[in-house]
Amino acid sequence: MTQGLCILGSTGSIGQNCLKVVDSLPDRFRVVALSAGRNLEVLASQVVKYHPKIVVVSQPELKEPLRERLKELGYTRRVKITFGVEGQVEASTHDAVDFVVSAGHGTTGLVATYEAVRVGKHVGLANKETLVAAGELVMRAAAKCRTEVLPIDSEHCAVHQCLRSGQAREVKRIILTASGGPFLKTPKRLFDSISPEQALKHPIWRMGGRITIDSATLVNKGLEIIEARWLFGVGPAQIDVVIHPESIIHSMVEFCDGSVMAQLGVPDMRIPIQYALTYPDRVAVADNGLGLDLVSAGRLNFAKPDTKRFPSLDLAREALLQGGILPCVLNAADEVAVEAFLNNRLRFSSIPRLIEEVMRQMSSYRAIKSLEDVLAGDREARLRAAEVVSAISA
């Protein structure tokens, strides 16, 4: 029996790689719902190929252009086109959907992912922001509904696989690996002059704009620390980060007897996506070039992260320790900062400074009792971050 899929963020890097996995395992999956932003050309081609029942665009004014594009492509099948958060929720909770891939940008898709968990859908999470902003709420709902939240990002997928080697009480620590990004060896005095074009050139991975910049500042790894706390139920002190530029070891778990389990693989997102979609099985596919040749990989290097040059790791740990709304604030402020940097309104070196300032301003906003609290905190943090950007760039 095939699984019905809803893909939130279908036109992005993760979404497109997810559909490649679907192509390689056509007897296991059927695409029920697709949700995207404004990339109508790619979305239309996906609709023509996969025949979803429901399609979601970001804004109401995009519905008719998508329908017109489908007509131009000769697509005559009936498909419901809707929009916005309500459309995403309808797609992710659709009766024919068994598994939701949450790969939207930023907090886009947070509400739909949460509602999918609440109605018992299994979720593959490529969107770190969902657990960063609302980890306690999402995981509590998952436990209540006895549904799986499976990590798709490479590091947490690696941890998930390593944890199958032991029991939760046997875990000493989780070790997340980080490539270090393009400025691993760049002197801090040069950070002011880093351009968006330079920051978007990741040495290993090919990703979307925000996550690529987050990798360059190591904010991405800070978000992963917070995400790991909720995914795996460990304390902040049990989560470490190590720089591993080759990105061959995707993460490790150290157990109480001193054994360390590591997951290795080529840096290709199809591997963690397929693992999440087929879990608990491992499914063989035709040769897709994803095998790891250790001889060709050569030497593997490791180092401690330099938090003086990359203070975002410490900011993430502070947000996690203080709890409440601060992880959400960290994420929202970073998203605003990255957008400002990409638009040449903020220096690269000012990204962590902006995050720290917004966290300081909102340090008394602590409690989270509902998703509405999260969304309100997210909005407030974005407003404050925008004010800081304006003040800096004035």
Image (cartoon, helix red, strand yellow):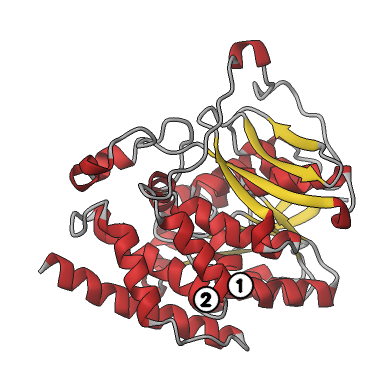
Whether residue 337 is visible here, answered yes or no, is yes
Residue 151 appears left or right of 86? right
Q: Which residue is mark 2?
A: 85
Outermost residue to the left: 394
The percent position of residue 273, horizontal first and vertical second, equals: 67, 44
Element type at mark 2: helix
Q: Amino acid at mark 2?
A: Val
Looking at the rendering, in which quadrant would you find the C terminus? bottom left
Crowding at mark 2 (Cα within 10 Å: few <14, some 14-19, many 20+): some
The percent position of residue 243, horizontal first and vertical second, equals: 52, 37
- Residue 176 falls in image quadrant: top right
**281 is higher (above) or lower (below) than 67:** above
Q: Amino acid at mark 1?
A: Ala
Q: Is there a contact, CB below 8 Å, between mark 1 and mark 2?
A: yes
Q: Which residue is mark 1?
A: 112
Which of the two residues, 214 or 287, is positioned nearer the viewer here?
A: 214
Residue visible at 35% across and 81% down in the picture: 361
Residue visible at 49% across and 49% down in the picture: 12
Element type at mark 1: helix
**287 is higher (above) or lower (below) than 37:** above
- Residue 196 falls in image quadrant: top left
Crowding at mark 1 (Cα within 10 Å: few <14, some 14-19, many 20+): many
Q: CA distance from mark 1 to mark 2?
A: 7 Å
Residue visible at 58% across and 31% down in the picture: 267
Q: Earlier in the sequence, mark 1 or mark 2?
A: 2
**197 is higher (above) or lower (below) than 359:** above
The percent position of residue 311, horizontal first and vertical second, equals: 40, 55
Which of the two residues, 173 or 394, is positioned nearer the viewer here?
A: 173
**173 is higher (above) or lower (below) than 34:** above
- Residue 180 falls in image quadrant: top left
In the rendered structure, find residue 150 and report the number of the disc placed on it. Answer: none
